[in-house]
Image (cartoon, rainbow, N blue to C red):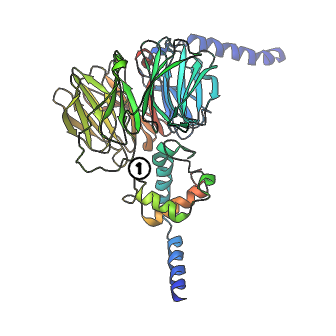
């Protein structure tokens, strides 16, 4: 039971820790233009697959965060952990699901 | 009074049309600047840097490129969303726009200027269109393997003999397309050319087609004078023991440099430009540069090569002196230097500086800025003199 509470606290902290407005803008710019160079703008796909909400619907946040952080071997998807914190990555996934690039 | 009032608008429009007729515009010094975010292009004058007009409603231009009709009046724009748009550079307007596929990556114009070819990701393949009407003439699905999968098609260029050449990213093939009869193109397929060709180039003389490989080291080379000899894998061993770094933007091979017997190309995933001896396709030198190169573009006289870089080094731009194969200048024009285009004889180079919302013009001798123009997230610059260049 205690563990559950700890987990809940932890995830609440992650959600609460949003990038500041300036960083959010930089992240959206990254999404549109750097991710967009392979995934398109809107990200309907290109060399990389579609990142539209429908295409991501059956993929978990954990999976998406992991792919962005570590890349995918055997594909052109590079790891972004050097440039994006876990919180920022989670925030970007949220933006993708809500079409936050608009 | 009343009669005058009623004819005023007429007078005014007559005056306007007289003005527009007075402004004759030659297309030889025009160009297009792609504004990727809002899906528009600027028509610019390249002799006296200025925006002349903006054409909007062009769809997803997140990876757009342009070829020109040989009279240089029309530009054909290839958008990411499969849009193929013919733009009239004299009238600043769209002549025709078709959405010919779900996802596309680039295109080419035939030797005789009569056929437009587009390379598509979805559905993977090449389509041929009449350059006048944009009527579809043929569809060539990029089928590979035993179960009939479709491959993304990259590196599509025109080649002498009314041909096109392209590469299959997943299919690991190079296709040589004879479009003498564009309604029934003949395809010669070269298989197992190397893993994941990601882009390709044609030497400016139309002799060689080379595809860069993403899935393994080196380039796949096809001699178009002797295609029967097949595809040769070159630079297979270069850097194979080096640490492979992640690639944040696919390099482009267009505009590669041929200087005497040497070729300069971007190294994949490394902070290097490679110098290749064209006589035996051996690696002569690896020039260290400020990031992973994206475009390695030659000034038209071949003396200088300008290099831009992938994220996170795309604020840099470097100039290589081909005489010594050494970097002579590192410029920082602003964040997000996406593309560069030389004026036809190379006294100036234009830069698309995306994150600063501007296009900048540099003098290639003094290496200093001479002009800047506002542009919305510019990502590509294409001048009309491309109309007369093979492979562009």
The answer to whether any part of residue B351 appears in the image is no
Decide which of B290, A73 is in the foreground and name it.
A73
Give the farthest residue toward the front. Answer: B146
Look at 48% across and 45% down and name the residue there: A33
* Residue B369 position within the rendered picture, expressed as x and y whole percent measured from the top left: 32, 33
Quadrant of the image occupied by residue B40: top right
According to the image, label 1 marks what residue?
Answer: A74
Q: Is residue A16 left or right of residue B247?
A: right
Work out whether A83 lies above or below B109: below
Give the farthest residue toward the bottom. Answer: A2
Q: Is residue B313 left or right of residue B22?
A: left
Look at 17% across and 26% down and name the residue there: B323
Decide which of B261, B323 is in the foreground and name it.
B261
Look at 53% across and 59% down and name the residue there: A93
Work out whether B331 lies above or below A90: above
* Residue B95 position within the rendered picture, expressed as x and y whole percent measured from the top left: 63, 20
Look at 49% across and 51% down and name the residue there: A31
Task: Count every numbered label the image shows and give the total.
Answer: 1
SS at badge 1? loop
Decide which of B122, B105 is in the foreground and name it.
B122
For the C terminus of chain B, the image quarter is top left
Decide which of B43, A43 is in the foreground and name it.
A43
Q: Is residue B25 left or right of residue B346?
A: right
Quadrant of the image occupied by residue B259: top left
* Residue B87 position within the rendered picture, expressed as x and y whole percent measured from the top left: 58, 22
* Residue B339 position within the rendered picture, expressed as x and y whole percent measured from the top left: 40, 34
Within 10 Å of disc 1 (Cα), the crowding (few <14, some 14-19, many 20+) is few
Work out whether B9 lies above or below A92: above
């Amino acid at each position: 039971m205690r563990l559950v509470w700890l987990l809940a606290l932890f995830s609440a902290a992650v959600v609460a820790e949003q990038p500041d407005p300036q960083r959010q803008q930089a992240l959206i710019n990254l999404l549109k233009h750097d991710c967009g160079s392979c995934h398109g703008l809107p990200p309907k796909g290109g060399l990389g697959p579609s990142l539209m909400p429908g295409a991501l619907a059956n993929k978990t946040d954990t999976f998406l965060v992991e792919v962005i952080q570590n890349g995918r071997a055997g594909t052109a998807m590079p790891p972004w952990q050097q440039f994006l914190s876990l919180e920022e990555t989670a925030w970007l996934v949220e933006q993708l699901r809500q079409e936050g690039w608009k | 009074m009343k009669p005058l009032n009623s004819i005023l608008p007429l007078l005014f429009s007559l005056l306007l049309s007289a003005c527009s007729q007075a402004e004759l515009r030659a297309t030889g010094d025009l160009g297009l600047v792609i504004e990727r975010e809002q899906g528009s292009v600027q028509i610019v004058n390249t002799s006296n840097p200025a925006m002349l007009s903006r054409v909007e409603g062009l769809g997803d231009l997140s990876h757009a490129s342009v070829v020109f009709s040989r009279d240089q009046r029309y530009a054909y724009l290839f958008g990411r969303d499969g849009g193929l748009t013919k733009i009239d550079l004299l009238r600043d307007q769209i002549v025709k726009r078709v959405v010919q596929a779900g996802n596309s990556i680039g295109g080419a114009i035939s030797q005789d200027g009569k056929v437009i070819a587009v390379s598509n990701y979805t559905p993977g393949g090449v389509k041929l269109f009449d350059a006048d009407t944009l009527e579809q003439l043929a569809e060539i699905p990029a089928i590979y393997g035993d179960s009939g999968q479709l491959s993304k098609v990259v590196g599509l260029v025109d080649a002498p003999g009314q041909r096109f050449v392209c590469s299959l990213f997943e299919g690991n093939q190079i296709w040589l397309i004879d479009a003498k009869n564009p309604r029934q193109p003949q395809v010669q397929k070269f298989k197992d050319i190397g893993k994941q060709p990601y882009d390709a180039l044609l030497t400016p003389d139309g002799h060689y087609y080379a595809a860069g490989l993403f899935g393994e080291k080196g380039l796949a080379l096809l001699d178009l004078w002797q295609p029967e000899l097949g595809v040769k894998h070159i630079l297979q061993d270069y850097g194979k023991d080096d640490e492979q770094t992640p690639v944040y933007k696919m390099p482009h091979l267009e505009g590669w440099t041929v200087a005497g017997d040497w070729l300069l190309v971007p190294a994949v995933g490394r902070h290097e430009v490679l110098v290749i001896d064209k006589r035996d396709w051996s690696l002569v030198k690896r020039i260290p540069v400020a990031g992973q190169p994206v475009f390695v573009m030659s000034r038209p006289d071949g003396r200088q090569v300008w290099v831009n870089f992938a994220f996170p080094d795309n604020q840099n731009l470097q100039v290589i002196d081909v005489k010594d194969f050494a970097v002579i200048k590192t410029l920082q024009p602003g964040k997000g230097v996406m593309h560069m285009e030389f004026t036809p004889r190379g006294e100036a180079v234009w830069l698309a500086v995306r994150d600063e919302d501007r296009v900048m013009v540099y003098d290639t001798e003094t290496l200093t800025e001479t002009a800047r123009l506002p542009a919305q997230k510019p990502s590509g610059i294409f001048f009309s003199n491309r109309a007369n260049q093979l492979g562009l």
